[in-house]
Amino acid sequence: MTKPIPDGYTAVTPYLIVDGCAEALEFYKKAFGAEEVMRLPMPDGSRIAHAEIRIGGAVIMLGDAMPEQGFKSPKALGGTPVSVHLYSEDADALFAQAVGDGAEVTMPVTEMFWAIASAK
């Protein structure tokens, strides 16, 4: 019998559609210490159909945009209604690491009424 939730997964797993999945995987590994679990390229090698990473034990799935199948990237949609929260013992250090690895700063680390983070 197939398990309803595979070992190592939780009931909810985010799936990100991106432009440049291979580059995104490398960025997540450098900036956030992600572990690449698997990568499934399209037969012609032009795009990644499916990939999985782990960050802090959580699985995130991602793949390249495939508009011909209805999988559009945030760029194609003009933005995204989705965000992924990453908890860290040291938000400032993780933020600096991500920026150092090429992340674009759209909002600095700061304390907000909905969450606690520090900006020293």
Image (spheres, rainbow, N blue to C red):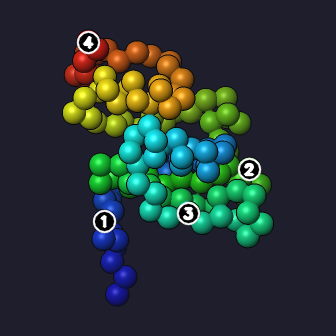
Disc 1: CA contacts within 10 A as few (<14), some (14-19) or many (>=20) = few
Instruction: Mark yes or no: residue 64 visible.
Output: yes
**Tag 4: residue type?**
Lys
Q: Secondary structure at mark 3?
A: strand
Q: Is residue 104 above or below residue 38?
A: above
Which residue is the site of mark 2?
67
The span from disc 4 to disc 3 (Cα, nearest Å) is 38 Å
Q: CA distance from mark 4 to mark 2?
A: 42 Å
Closer to the chain start, of discs 2 and 1, is 1
**Relative to 118, is 44 on the left or the right?**
right
Q: What is the distance, in whole Å, between disc 2 and disc 1 at their CAs?
A: 30 Å
Q: Which residue is mark 4?
A: 120
Furthest residue to the bottom? 1
Q: Residue at x 29, y 49 (%)?
A: 56
Please give the residue where the numbered disc 1 appears in the rendered image. Answer: 8
Nearer the observer, disc 4 or disc 2? 4
- Label 2 sits on what residue type? Pro
Q: Quadrant of the N terminus?
A: bottom left
* Pointer 3 residue: 39
First in residue order: circle 4 vs circle 1: 1
Q: Please say if 115 is above or below 2.
A: above
Q: Secondary structure at mark 2?
A: helix
Task: Tell me the SS state at disc 1.
Answer: loop
Choose top left, top right, bottom left or bottom right for residue 111: top left
For disc 2, the neighbor class at 10 Å (few under 14, some 14 to 19, many from 20) is few
Identify the residue at horizontal 38%, vertical 45% (top origin): 33
Expressed as whole percent of the image width and height from the top left, the position of residue 85 reads: 36, 36
